[in-house]
Image (cartoon, coloured by chain):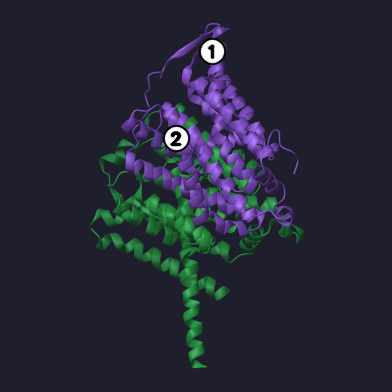
């Protein structure tokens, strides 16, 4: 029994990270209908940034959140200006297709650049609390995992408050509901898209810092993208609130897979579920019928 | 129309014959190696081109069909079946796999198809990594008198078939229907095109050719880990190649493959894949600004030249 509880609690802590991973992707898809497959590569880059910053300064990696997040906000701003603003004029279907292709190119570029610069070696930030655990009713919970769960809850609540309580957040939601009506209401849609896109990038930095505390290498970007897509479909496309639950659900499913079949097939369970849901409920498990 | 078709077929035959007599004069294995690689990538990207370029279904899962064909080819070949029959078998095996996992994926539309097929190819590589962890070798009788020439001829045959099929497709009613589906699914359905049927035909042809390419890979590479032909690179490279050369054209993927293989050779010693890096950057700009690829640019400048000549004469 303890055995099962241990596997599942581990899965849920992992799942919180998956939720964070999918958050930026979900925001960008929900607001602009851009499918940003390169999200995993951004997280990988953020992880490397944290790794090197830690390597040279030896300051606690969680503190780097305050540097890496704004940095990625700026990167998102620049990339939108260079690449994505050209896409905004396309009709819906073509926009999604082209954004998929472009971000797919970015994914390949970023992961190959990372291999060129930093080699394919596995790295990890090792802090004083790496590997420390808390015992809770006999279940061992890693400190970093708990930190990730707390961070995920804080970030999602903050984003939710931003989207529902602030003026700009309401504008973002208006744009995600209906582009044209938002224009008619006097919302500067281009600016909203630019800021939402940059926030999506900034949201990639947070799971990046968490990832740097685990073992990572450039190839992780494909893995993370694929986790983010699965969470996205579990939560419903474009749903912010569902993302944390979707992530935890995926973590639990993987844990069930590990328990029933074994560690090597951990990822396969999520993927099979993904394909099945895509076939029968393409709007997502919790999504509304389009 | 008919005349153009015959002309293209004749050119293709000419190139194939030139390539076939080339080894008599060329004693260097290096060029032969390059041509084999170019044929391999041409076949694979033409296969993607039929589904992605003509029918507009962007598949990120071609490595699955490529990989299964490589596995089946190696198995048939090792059990004593002559290579060309094994090639046929491997091609059919990827069709069988497609009918199990590929056809249902047409329930997915647009970008869902792309991410769905990506998920399928990830499932495939993880499964193969776990089920077959070892290394696959060519049969020892082949390795003892190893020579590139039979591989070279098989490469030409595979490349020839792939290009021939695409030429025939681009001049047929079937090809027109596929292009119609690419341009607008709803209106092509309304004028009486059975979308599902044509998508399945296109996928059938595409996977048969991907299977040929997989068989060729298995014939060419003497030893590899079982999961190598399932590597996601085999899904991604044809997308880059076709788009850069010109998706939905006959010559585009060939030009793309030549550029790709040459770049790969130039940067062969550097860490990481410089060719994928360069191709990725070019790919983004092609998608954004030149949706017709290199071929589109060439055609455009040719037309401009002609019209400028005409206007001068006038």
**Badges 1 and 2, same chain:** yes
Quarter residue A252 falls in:
top right
Q: Nearer the viewer, residue A283 or B200?
A: A283
Seen at 26% across and 40% down, the residue is: B144
> In the rendered picture of this protein, how many numbered marks are placed on residues?
2
Q: Residues within 10 Å of mark 2 (few under 14, many from 20)?
A: some
Q: Mark 1 falls on what kind of element? A: helix
The outermost residue toward the left is: B27
Q: Mark 2 falls on what kind of element? A: helix
Which of the two labelled residues, at mark 1 and mark 2, occupies the earlier sequence position?
Answer: 1
Identify the residue position indicated by label 2 in the image: A220
- What color was chain B assigned in the picture? green
- Note whether residue A275 is visible: no
Identify the residue position indicated by label 1 in the image: A6
Chain letter behind tag 1: A
Q: Which chain is purple?
A: A
The reply, left or right, for residue A204 in relation to residue A231 is left
Q: Mark 1 to mark 2: distance in Å?
A: 25 Å
Q: Nearer the viewer, residue B236 or B192?
A: B236
Q: Nearer the viewer, residue A17 or B97?
A: A17
Chain letter behind tag 2: A
User: For residue A40, which numbered disc appears in the image?
Assistant: none
Name the spot of residue B284 as percent of width and height, x first.
Answer: 48, 55
Q: Residues within 10 Å of mark 1 (few under 14, many from 20)?
A: some
Seen at 60% across and 25% down, the residue is: A248
- Note whether residue B313 is visible: yes
Q: Is the residue under label 2 in contact with that under label 1 (CB below 8 Å)? A: no
Name the spot of residue A142 as percent of width and height, x first.
Answer: 48, 17
Instruction: Reply above or below: A90 against A243.
Output: below
Q: Nearer the viewer, residue B127 or B15?
A: B127
């Amino acid at each position: 029994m303890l055995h099962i509880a241990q596997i599942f609690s581990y899965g849920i802590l992992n799942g919180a990270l998956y939720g964070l991973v999918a958050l930026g992707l979900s925001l960008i898809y929900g607001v602009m209908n851009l499918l940003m497959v390169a999200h995993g590569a951004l997280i990988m880059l953020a992880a490397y940034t944290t790794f090197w910053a830690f390597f040279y300064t030896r300051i606690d990696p969680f503190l780097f959140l305050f540097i890496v997040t704004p940095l990625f906000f700026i990167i998102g701003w620049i990339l939108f200006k260079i690449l994505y603003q050209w896409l905004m004029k396309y009709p819906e279907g073509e926009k999604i297709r082209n954004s998929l292709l472009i971000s797919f190119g970015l994914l390949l570029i970023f992961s190959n650049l990372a291999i060129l610069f930093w080699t394919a070696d596995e790295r990890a930030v090792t802090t004083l609390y790496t590997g420390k655990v808390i015992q809770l009713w006999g279940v061992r919970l890693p400190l970093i995992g708990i930190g990730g769960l707390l961070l995920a809850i804080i970030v999602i609540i903050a984003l939710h408050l931003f989207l529902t309580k602030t003026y700009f957040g309401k504008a973002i939601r208006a744009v995600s509901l209906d582009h044209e009506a938002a224009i008619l209401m006097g919302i500067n849609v281009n600016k909203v898209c630019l800021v939402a896109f940059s926030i999506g990038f900034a949201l990639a930095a947070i799971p990046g810092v968490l990832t740097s505390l685990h073992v990572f290498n450039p190839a992780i970007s494909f893995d993370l993208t694929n986790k983010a897509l699965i969470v996205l479909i579990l939560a419903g496309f474009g749903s912010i609130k569902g993302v944390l639950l979707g992530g935890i659900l995926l973590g639990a499913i993987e844990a069930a897979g590990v328990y029933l079949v074994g560690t090597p097939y951990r990822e396969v369970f999520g993927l099979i579920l993904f394909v099945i849901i895509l076939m029968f409920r393409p709007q997502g498990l919790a999504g509304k019928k389009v | 129309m008919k005349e153009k078709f015959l002309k293209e077929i004749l050119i293709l035959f000419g190139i194939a014959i030139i390539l076939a007599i080339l080894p008599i004069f060329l004693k260097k294995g290096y060029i032969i190696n390059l041509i084999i690689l170019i044929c391999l990538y041409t076949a694979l990207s033409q296969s993607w081109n039929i589904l992605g370029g003509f029918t507009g279904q962007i598949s990120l899962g071609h490595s699955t069909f490529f990989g299964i064909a490589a596995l089946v080819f190696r198995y048939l070949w090792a059990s004593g079946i002559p290579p060309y029959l094994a090639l046929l078998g491997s091609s059919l095996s990827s069709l069988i796999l497609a009918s199990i996992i590929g056809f249902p994926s047409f329930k997915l539309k647009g970008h869902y198809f792309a991410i769905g097929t990506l998920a399928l190819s990830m499932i495939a590589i993880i499964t193969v990594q776990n089920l077959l962890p070892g290394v696959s070798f060519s049969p020892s009788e082949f390795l003892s008198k190893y020579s590139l020439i039979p591989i070279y001829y098989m490469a030409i045959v595979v490349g020839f078939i792939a290009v021939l099929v695409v030429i025939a497709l681009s001049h047929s009613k079937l090809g027109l229907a596929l292009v119609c589906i690419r341009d607008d699914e709803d209106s092509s359905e309304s004028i009486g095109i059975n979308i599902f049927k044509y998508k399945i035909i296109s996928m059938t042809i595409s996977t048969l050719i991907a299977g040929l390419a997989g068989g060729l890979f298995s014939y060419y590479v003497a030893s590899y880990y079982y999961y190598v032909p399932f590597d996601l690179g085999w899904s991604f490279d044809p997308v880059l190649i076709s788009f850069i050369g010109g998706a939905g054209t006959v010559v585009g993927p060939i030009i793309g493959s030549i550029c790709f293989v040459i770049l790969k050779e130039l940067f062969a010693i550097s860490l990481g894949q410089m060719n994928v890096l360069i191709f990725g950057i070019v790919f983004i700009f092609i998608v954004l600004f030149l949706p017709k690829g290199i071929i589109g640019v060439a055609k455009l400048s040719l037309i401009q030249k002609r019209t400028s000549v005409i206007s001068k004469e006038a």
